[in-house]
Image: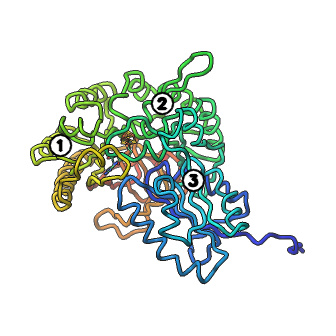
Amino acid sequence: MADDTTAQPSKKLYIETVGCQMNVLDSELVVARLRDDGYELTDDIDQADAILYNTCSVRQHAEDKIYSALGRIKNLKREKPGLSIGVLGCMAQKDQGSILKRAPHVDVVIGPGQLGRVPELLSKARAEEKPQLAVSLARNAGSRDRVTSSFDSYDADREPAVRPSPHQAYLRVMMGCDKFCTYCIVPSVRGPEQSRPPDAIVAEARLLALQGVKEITLVGQTVNSYKHKTPDGRVARLSDLLARLHDIDGLVRIKFITSFPNDMTDDLLQAVRDLPKVSRYIHVPAQSGCDDVLKRMKRMYTVAFYEEMLARLRETIPGSSVSSDFIVGFCGETDESFEKTARLLERSRFKNSFIFKYSARTGTKADSLFPDDVPDEVKRRRNHILLDLQTAISLEDNRAFIGREVEVLVEGPSRSTTRKEGWDGPDQLVGRTTCDRIAVFPGPESLAGEMARVRIEQASAVTLFGGLAGGANGRTA
Ligand code: SAM
Ligand code: SF4
């Protein structure tokens, strides 16, 4: 009989993550640390001993969501005084102590550069019965080295349970950002740009492959600016890193996000062309199609430069796909400047575009230099116009796949409610092509993590629908 007199009752952790892939990855690392500290994950917030929000500051809306969530759990804390509540990530770094003023029931406020300390600070808050705040230095608070070292990096603690799927993982190659686009809060909350040493990245990728990961996505705010200098003066670029990762047994696909237009060098494009495991998909945001707006955004390129880069990319990597981000309603964006953005979007034929309404962020250059002068209803209208244009392009390009066979890496059961028209059969699988197009098709769950061939029969703007091709199970060799 098991001796349960010594068994520690495990503590339950509820964690909610908003924002980008960087945050998804941060949450994975936090959960890994807390597991070592005796926590297990729960989906039920009422059962939790610790509730953590890993937050985003890029737009106001993301912050509002967190403050409302904190308001909703106030009563929970009253009913369960042992409950620990934490605000982690970018909002913690941006708002710091003011979070505790606005939500005094919060126990820990921990910036993205301090996340390795989550277990220690949760215990300290409980032991001392007072809130704990841990943030990194502001960008202007000291020398670059001092500020950089206040943004800690992690060991390769990895926790499969929080990944998007067991076969897919994010892998950080860079931290921070030095571009200082005038609208963007990221350089202040994520700190100076740092590229991790290639050996550490390769070791982490090997560990992931051993855990059964088939696809890794390298993440960095401007991932194609990756550059690591060794003490002997050698420089590793993203293309060098891709070549090393390509040799790892077990990995079948390597992606990287997000790229900056000015850093799209030929060696990188050639690596994408020549390394078959590297996804032929590049996310390289244009943000605007108007030179005046790009200048106010301090994006450091013109529309002509962006289009030349796009042409070079497509010429070097045939059959590739490209996606973009756009901000509508940035300070001083006139009807005429918006028109130019709409025309750029039409000409560029992106696979998809993420379109955001400009949200003024305290602490950014744009917020102090330019009035937020485009009314919200105009932002909303422009947002819809771009979305409609992009949807029409995506639909037309996806329809060109009907009747063709594509090879996909199967991610697992399709969680979306999207169904092929007329389909009322069992749940379907979802996979992605090397160009990041989503395909949904019926098939056995055992195909998850495998490559499969799918014959496309129908298409929507975001999804290709079809059936397994080539043999009973559709597996490719
Ligand atoms: N580093 C990436 C890049 O430069 O493309 C993207 C990082 S940012 C978290 C993701 C996207 O959010 C940006 O590409 C931009 O379109 C959007 N974004 C950033 N700041 C914004 C703001 N203040 N208002 C609206 N959208 C914003
Ligand atoms: Fe923000 Fe610009 Fe850096 Fe992207 S490149 S994170 S938009 S400052």
Residue 403: x %, y % from top left: 27, 47
Residue with the mark numbered 1: 341
131 horizontally vs 103: left or right? right
Above-or-below relation of 163 to 4: above
Q: Residues within 10 Å of mark 1 (few under 14, many from 20)?
A: many
Q: Amino acid at mark 3?
A: Pro
Task: Name the residue located 17 percent from the left edge and 43 percent from the top edge.
Answer: 341
| Residue situated furthest left in the rendering | 336
Disc 1 or 2, which lies upstream in sequence? Answer: 2
Task: Name the residue located 14 percent from the left edge and 41 percent from the top edge.
Answer: 340
Query: Depth-wise, is mark 3 or mark 2 nearer the camera?
Result: 2
Q: CA distance from mark 3 to mark 2?
A: 27 Å
Residue 99 appearing in the image: yes
Disc 3 or 2, which lies upstream in sequence? Answer: 3
- Secondary element at image label 3: loop
Q: CA distance from mark 3 to mark 1?
A: 39 Å
Quarter occupied by residue 440: bottom left
Q: Residues within 10 Å of mark 3 (few under 14, many from 20)?
A: some
407 horizontally vs 207: left or right? left
Location of ligand 2 given as a quarter of the image: top left
Depth check, front residue: 246 or 22:
22
Q: Amino acid at mark 2?
A: Tyr
**Do the residues under discs 1 and 2 have CB atoms within 8 angstroms?**
no
The label shown at residue 166 is: 3
**Do the residues under discs 3 and 1 have CB atoms within 8 angstroms?**
no
Residue with the mark numbered 2: 226
Above-or-below relation of 188 to 316: below
| Residue situated furthest bottom in the rendering | 79
Q: Amino acid at mark 1?
A: Thr
